[in-house]
């Protein structure tokens, strides 16, 4: 089943997920996964062990696993895109809005290839993604400023398979990264930094990867 992130959902948003597996990502305690067994002003989640915990809807991000019915849920929450990596969660819809205001450069994608095995990818999407759509990169202060792709992993996989030496990308600054980050690191309730290999580009090396280009200068 595919999954979706619901950021501070309403009870109505959660109804299609009753009886299905969900993971609560609260700001003040570790993630809690189990079956959604009840909805009030809180989500009631039961683990396989039988333990039940309650999570206020207005304070919790929920990772919900979709079935056919969930795919048609008329919810504004499900329309947003998120990226989760090692306990961090970013609002990619917001990141894309910011990225549209930033300069596009061409970068060597090779430093990020080693992480592809850790990312859940949809194999059927990879051959069809648009390689002219910029990756969104973000420096992670808790990982020493290492730069992580937060949007564009399917494009990266296609670039690797087709031997493409440079791809368009935009780089958020640390303030913008923190703005689009929902959970992780210095955000409440998370103290673990993602293990981004130091072979990844830093913001300094990113500047050296290639000259700044406008969108009209991208390779076709």
Image (tube, grey):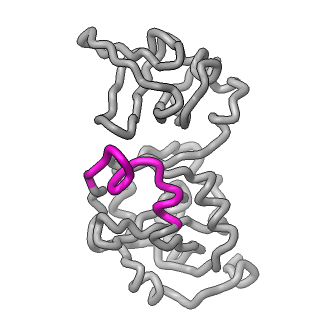
User: In the rendered view of the protein, which quadrant contains the C terminus?
Assistant: bottom right
Horizontal and vertical percent for residue 26? 39, 35
Magenta includes 12? no
Residue closer to the observer: 69 or 10: 10
- Relative to 130, 8 lies left or right: left
Asked if 86 appears above or below 44 in the picture, the reply is below
User: Which residue is depicted at the point 57% across and 80% down?
Assistant: 106
Asked if 53 appears above or below 164 in the picture, the reply is above
Residue closer to the observer: 112 or 84: 84
Magenta includes 183? yes
User: Which residue is depicted at the point 41% across and 70% down?
Assistant: 139
- Relative to 65, 33 lies left or right: left
Count of numbered labels shown in the rendering: 0
- Relative to 202, 76 lies left or right: right
Q: Is residue 157 visible?
A: no
Horizontal and vertical percent for residue 99? 63, 67
Asked if 119 appears above or below 1 in the picture, the reply is below
User: Which residue is depicted at the point 44% across and 81% down?
Assistant: 206
Asked if 116 appears above or below 30 in the picture, the reply is below
User: Which residue is depicted at the point 68% across and 72% down?
Assistant: 101
**Rendered image quadrant of residue 148:** bottom left
Residue closer to the observer: 187 or 213: 187
Q: Is residue 70 visible?
A: yes
Horizontal and vertical percent for residue 131? 63, 65
Horizontal and vertical percent for residue 182? 47, 49
Q: Which residues are magenta?
A: 176-192
């Amino acid at each position: 089943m595919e999954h979706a992130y619901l950021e501070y959902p309403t009870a109505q948003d959660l109804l299609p997920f009753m009886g299905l597996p969900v993971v609560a990502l609260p700001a003040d305690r570790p993630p809690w996964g189990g079956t959604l067994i009840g909805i009030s002003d809180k989500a009631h989640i039961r683990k396989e062990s039988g333990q039940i915990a309650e999570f206020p809807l207005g304070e919790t991000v929920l990772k919900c696993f979709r079935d056919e019915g969930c795919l048609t849920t008329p919810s504004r929450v499900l329309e947003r895109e998120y990226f989760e990596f090692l306990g961090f969660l970013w609002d990619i819809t917001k990141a894309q809005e910011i990225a549209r205001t930033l300069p596009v450069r061409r970068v060597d994608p090779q430093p990020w290839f080693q992480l592809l095995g850790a990312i859940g990818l949809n194999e059927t999407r990879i051959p069809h993604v648009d390689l002219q759509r910029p990756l969104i990169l973000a420096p992670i202060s808790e990982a020493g400023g290492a730069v992580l792709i937060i949007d564009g992993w399917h494009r990266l996989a296609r670039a690797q398979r087709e031997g493409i030496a440079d791809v368009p990308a935009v780089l958020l600054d640390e303030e913008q990264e923190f703005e689009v980050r929902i959970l992780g690191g210095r955000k409440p309730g998370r103290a673990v930094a993602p293990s981004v290999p130091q072979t990844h580009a830093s913001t300094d090396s990113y500047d050296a990867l290639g000259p700044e280009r406008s969108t009209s200068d991208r390779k076709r």
